[in-house]
């Protein structure tokens, strides 16, 4: 019997909360929350850029806006993202209060033993597969990124009738979604894949206006189990689309995007330090529209109760080695940014400055809580510690999935010439075709630990401590990996020469992110005790006078609001 035990519980909880609005009253002036994810930003990055670093920007702070927010807010220096620290679980944890065990979300490309494959092959190569209604599923690789767009080469994701850049949930191709045999092979949309509700549903259902902007149409997943209609405004221009000129767009630092700033790199916005700033500016301008009471594209709308966006530029600045341009990243283990990475910090800060200025100009500053955090950080900060397996030459060893290729489902196996490949970055998530082979698979990994750069192997009790039991039937979870491998610090499973950092893993550099809460009535300070980014969700509801217990993640996992705040 396939594991379904969470769904009746969540459905019952939804009924209980359907009429719940403001469960508590307080004197907070907060009417709006602006939530910002600066993807890749470490806690130490905030310290460095707010205070300045010798030899960088003449020793002066290079994030004056963030520094100013810090003077009216609380910095949580030991904040940790979800584990795994991939964008998909990282984002969903922030907005739900839950962790992967409850969300059922482990990676944008993962695996589900209870689903069958898509009707047509995705843009990234997740192959089409059969699905028989109400029959036993085969299990299949899941994909919730650019590959499910109608047309991932377009910034608008191929949405019918959309303007040049207007990627929305309408950009998702249902034929490229995995299918659920238990629902007659219906496609599983991103928000249906998520097992819990989110702050967007709670706020919308309480009469608020809920909005979010992100890097893929697939990240309409933030709607959660309440469904896409709880997002009053969603904007997801495709980050991995073909780069184009953006008429009328200029970055906050003055770079003209009407023509492609870096025409040598047009395959994806993430391939260029310059082009990615133009991409992010699309979302910055959309936020400015909302602050002015408009929709993301300048149409009729209103100032949202909850709104925000992710920045991709800093993550690119950390990871990228751009041909004929140079390397981003850091100069040392202390987090001193390279010149190219410095430019991305300055771009993000200038963008935040525009938002702050707009809030003040529109009389919203005193009533808006600003939260700056990140879905994930990036590892390693220390450039001397980066080591790619198998590496560009292919001679640096083999990844865990390669060692176990014959034990993996065909859609996960690196031996499959038609698949999307295994789930590996600076972590390796292993789903076996037969879970009874777990011990023999672990023995293979142990015997090749040096070749695969293995640091720690989680399976059996060490895995079940933080996640649901893997497998089908008997209360097991069809999405939990059988094995999670965290490599030695600095090891990334890739053959690419274009990167020098990655995320997804469990290391401190992967997970320790900026978490800054700033607003009227907050006594500035620093919290040194450990907190999680999943605590952002109940904090937002509490700030708005809503009951955090309306969140499934809060009730099921006991997630607390962030400490030291006046609400």
Image (cartoon, rainbow, N blue to C red):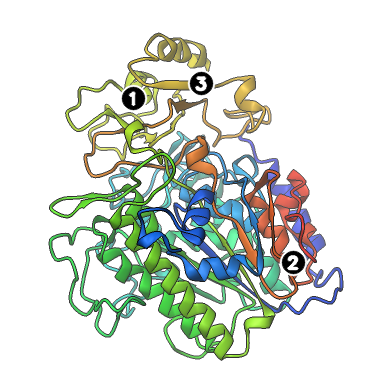
The secondary element bearing badge 3 is classed as strand
Report which residue position mark 2 lands on: 523
Task: Give the residue pinned by disc 1.
Answer: 399
Identify the image quadrant of residue 227. bottom right
Q: Which of marks 3 and 1 is nearer the N terminus?
A: 1
Tell me the crowding category of disc 1: few under 14, some 14 to 19, or many 20 or more residues within 10 angstroms, Cα based.
many
Circle 3 packing at 10 Å, graded few (<14), some (14-19), many (20+), is some
Q: Where is residue 279 in the image (x, y as percent from the top left)?
A: 32, 69
Residues under labels 3 and 2: Cα distance?
43 Å
Q: Which residue is drawn at 47% across and 47% down?
A: 377
Residue at 61 percent of width and 47 percent of height: 103
Q: Residues within 10 Å of mark 2 (few under 14, many from 20)?
A: some
Q: Mark 3 points at which residue?
A: 457
Foreground of the two, 90 or 79: 79
**CB contact under 8 Å: marks 2 and 1:** no
In the rendered view, tell whether residue 520 sits above or below residue 51: below
On screen, residue 286 above or below 313: below
Towards the viewer: 344 or 141: 344
Which percent across, then down, holds residue 163? Answer: 32, 80
Report if residue 383 is visible in the image: yes
């Amino acid at each position: 019997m396939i594991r379904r035990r969470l769904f009746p519980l969540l459905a019952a909880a939804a009924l209980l909360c359907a009429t719940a609005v403001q469960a508590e009253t307080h004197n907070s002036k907060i009417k709006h929350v602006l939530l910002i994810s600066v993807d890749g930003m470490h806690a130490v990055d905030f310290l460095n850029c707010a205070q300045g670093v010798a030899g960088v920007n003449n020793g002066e702070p290079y994030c004056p806006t963030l520094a100013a927010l810090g003077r009216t807010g609380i910095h949580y220096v030991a904040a940790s993202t979800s584990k795994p620290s991939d964008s998909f679980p990282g984002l969903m944890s922030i907005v739900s209060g839950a962790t992967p065990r409850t969300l059922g979300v482990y990676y944008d490309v993962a695996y589900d033993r209870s689903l069958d494959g898509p009707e047509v092959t995705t843009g990234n190569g997740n192959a089409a597969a059969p699905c028989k209604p109400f029959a036993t599923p085969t299990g299949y690789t899941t994909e919730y990124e650019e590959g499910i767009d109608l047309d991932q080469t377009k910034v608008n994701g191929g949405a019918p009738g959309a303007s040049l850049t207007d990627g929305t949930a309408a950009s998702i191709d249902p034929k490229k979604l995995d299918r659920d045999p238990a629902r007659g092979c219906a496609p599983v949309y991103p928000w249906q894949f998520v097992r819990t509700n989110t702050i967007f549903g709670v706020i919308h259902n309480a009469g608020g206006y809920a909005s979010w902007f992100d890097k893929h149409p697939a990240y309409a997943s933030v709607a959660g189990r309440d469904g896409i209609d709880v997002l009053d405004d969603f904007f997801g221009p495709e980050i991995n689309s073909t780069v184009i000129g953006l008429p009328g767009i200029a970055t906050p630092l003055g770079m003209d995007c009407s023509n492609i700033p870096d025409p040598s790199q047009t395959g994806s916005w993430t391939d260029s330090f310059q082009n990615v700033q133009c991409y992010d500016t699309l979302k910055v301008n959309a936020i400015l529209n909302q602050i002015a009471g408009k929709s993301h594209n300048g149409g009729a709308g209103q100032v949202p109760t909850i709104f925000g966006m992710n920045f991709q530029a800093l993550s690119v600045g950390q990871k990228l080695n751009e041909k004929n341009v140079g390397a981003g990243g850091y100069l040392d283990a202390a987090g001193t940014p390279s010149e190219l990475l410095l430019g991305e910090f300055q771009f993000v800060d200038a963008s935040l400055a525009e938002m702050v200025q707009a809030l003040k100009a529109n009389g919203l500053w005193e009533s808006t809580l600003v939260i700056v955090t990140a879905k994930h950080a990036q590892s390693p900060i220390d450039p001397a510690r980066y080591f790619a397996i198998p590496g560009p030459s292919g001679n640096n060893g083999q990844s865990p999935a390669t060692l176990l290729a014959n034990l993996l489902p065909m859609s996960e196996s690196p031996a499959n010439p038609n698949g999307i490949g295994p789930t590996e970055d600076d972590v390796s998530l292993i789903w076996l075709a037969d879970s009874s082979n777990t011990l023999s698979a672990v023995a293979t990994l142990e015997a090749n630990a040096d070749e695969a750069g293995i640091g720690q192997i989680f399976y059996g009790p060490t895995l079940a401590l933080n996640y649901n039991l893997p497998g089908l039937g008997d209360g097991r979870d069809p999405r939990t990996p059988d094995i999670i491998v965290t490599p030695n610090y600095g090891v990334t499973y890739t053959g690419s020469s274009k990167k020098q950092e990655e995320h997804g893993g469990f290391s401190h550099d992967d997970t320790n992110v900026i978490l800054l809460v700033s607003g009227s009535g907050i006594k500035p300070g620093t919290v040194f005790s450990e907190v999680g980014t999943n605590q952002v969700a109940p904090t937002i509801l509490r700030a708005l006078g809503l009951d955090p217990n309306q969140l499934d993640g809060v009730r099921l996992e006991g997630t607390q609001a962030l400490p030291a705040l006046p609400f």
